[in-house]
Image (spheres, grey):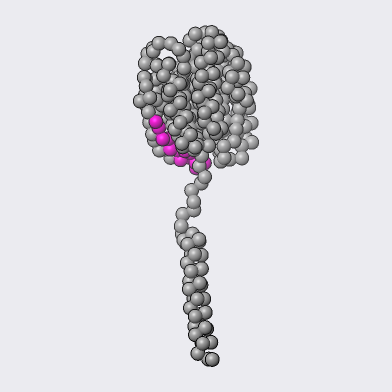
Amino acid sequence: MLAPMAAHRRVSRRGFLRGGCAGLAAAALARPALGAEPPPPQGLTFGVFADPQYGERKETIGRVYRDSPAKLAACIEAMAKARPAFVIGLGDFVDGTSKDPEVELGHLGKIEEIFRRFEGPRHHVLGNHDLDALTKEELLKATGMPAAHYAFDAPPFRCIVLDGCYRKDFEPYARGNFVWTDSWIPAAQLRWLEAELKKAEGKALVFVHQPLDRDDVHCVRNAGEVRRILEDSGKVVAVFSGHNHKGGYRKVRGIHYVTVCGMVEGPGLEHNAYALVTVTPAGALTIKGFGAQPSSTRE
């Protein structure tokens, strides 16, 4: 009688030891190693394109207007596979050269139908060519934009969309009543920008059609004033713009300024341009470019 009981005790002890060792191993795997680096801060990945500038017109100065629907369709197909948090178009959805509101609304409708194929959140920025034949009110209605300038949340960032489509006298662009080099952000919008940045709980990203990184013909003419607001907030990590189809990058006082290449430039899908962008609150920026858009990593 004693032998079976002893055997039972030995088996139970071995089982206990096996179970205990397995539990300790699992606990060790679950715990971070002493001195291990903390996990990196959560980042945001989004898709971006600029200046499709679609129109039914002949190629001029290297711009192939009629190829933009196919280019945007390829962009949206890539975004559907990548599944970014959102996709944003940085303005000049249409060329506007016809000056005919009905024609340009038709062009915009074709571009919007393609853009809507992306099933996630979509956002728009107003561009100067969009307003060659249309008013801002017509653009807002056709695209579903909440306003000409607005903000939205894409954790961990507050995203701010600016409207640089104003003349020096602060009249809004409408039906071609402007010169493209005369781009300003009025005082009321600057006050709104300051208020948005103050109430942002974390870091912020800014989107605008005309660049803000320098003082030249492609940029908002009071860009220096805008930059001071962005810098003083201490919250802006990066600014994304279009308008200058060559694209570009600068870092000014700790803020990344990215100008996305124009989609309308060059014939065929091999000359497409769009990007997936990943940015962290700490300021790390990775651009995965497609076509003419360069890839880069910035700190």
Q: Which of 18/162 is in front? A: 18
Nearest the viewer among 157 and 119 is: 119
Identify the residue at horizontal 47%, vertical 29% (top origin): 76
Q: Residue furthest bottom?
A: 1
281 magenta-colored: yes
Residue 193 x/y as whole percent: 60, 28
Query: Is-magenta flag for residue 74?
Result: no
Magenta span: 277-290
**What main secondary structure does the magenta stretch of the protein show?**
strand
The residue that appears at 53% across and 87% down in the rendered structure is 5
Residue 233 shows in the view: no
Task: List x then y, in percent, for residue 272.
Answer: 39, 25
Q: Quadrant of the C terminus?
A: top left
Number of labelled discs? Answer: 0
Q: Quadrant of residue 177?
A: top right
Reply above or below: 65 against 45. above
Viewer-closest of 217 and 162: 162
Is 259 or 90 nearer to us in this picture?
A: 90
Q: Residue at coordinates 36% horizontally, 19% vertically from top-left?
A: 267
Q: Is residue 55 above or below residue 41?
A: above
Quadrant (top left/top right/bottom left/bottom right) for the N terminus: bottom right
Q: Position of residue 197 (x, y in %)?
A: 60, 33
Visible in this render: residue 297?
yes
Q: Quadrant of residue 234?
A: top right
Is residue 184 positioned above or below 196 on the image?
above
* Picture coordinates of residue 113, whole percent (x, y): 53, 23
